[in-house]
Image: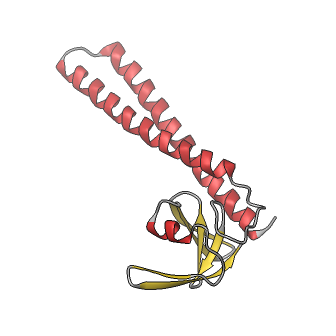
Amino acid sequence: MTFKQKMHQYYLQLVQDRIDVFKDMILALTEDSKNDAKGSAGDKHETALSMMHIEQEKLNTKLREVMAQKVVLDKIDAANVSKNIIVGSLIRANGIYLYLSVALPKINVDEVSIIALSPQSPLGNKLMGNGVGFTFEINSTKYLIEEIL
């Protein structure tokens, strides 16, 4: 397994773990609301139930976002290496490793820090379609694409 494939697997697992956590939280809220409905009545009960539904909607929204991230990651072939930067490229620029996929937290794989960013981000947008040796500037920081993995 290449470094890029290992890193991609790590991000897939990270996203799957988030999906599992959100599903567990939604299930717990559903169970709580069922249990609360059995023994309560009145205004306090209605308020508590309403608060649970609001929280459940927030969690459902977050779950949809994370599932959309998983769809993008699932479409990426980590074995593919392109001369020009595309979604799924692992780029080294200024000594920093950038994974053009979806916006996710920074991770460490084999003691190498990797930042995942979306193609819609300002940096991701500048990277798309360019190759090794391309230079550009964002927020008065100059970048040089050193390698595409």
Note whether residue 41 is visible. Answer: yes
Residue 146: x, y in percent?
64, 83
All told, the count of numbered labels is: 0
Residue 47: x, y in percent?
22, 25
Q: Which of 15 and 147 is in front in this view?
A: 147
17 vs 28: above or below: below
48 vs 147: above or below: above
Q: In this view, does 56 lie to the left or right of 70?
A: left
In the picture, which quadrant includes the C terminus?
A: bottom right
Q: In this view, does 65 lie to the left or right of 110?
A: left
Note whether residue 16 is visible. Answer: no
50 vs 92: above or below: above
Q: Residue at position x 48%, y 59% from top?
A: 120
Q: Nearer the viewer, residue 30 or 58?
A: 58
In the picture, which quadrant includes the N terminus?
A: bottom right
Q: Residue at position x 57%, y 67% from top?
A: 128
State the residue lying farthest toward the left.
Answer: 43
30 vs 3: above or below: above
Q: Residue at position x 70%, y 57% from top?
A: 9
Quadrant of the rendered image containing residue 89: bottom right
Q: Nearer the viewer, residue 36 or 101?
A: 101
Quadrant of the rendered image containing residue 37: top left
Residue 95: x, y in percent?
59, 84
Quadrant of the rendered image containing residue 30: top left
The colour scheme used here is secondary structure
Q: Is residue 5 left or right of residue 43?
A: right
State the residue lying farthest toward the right.
Answer: 1
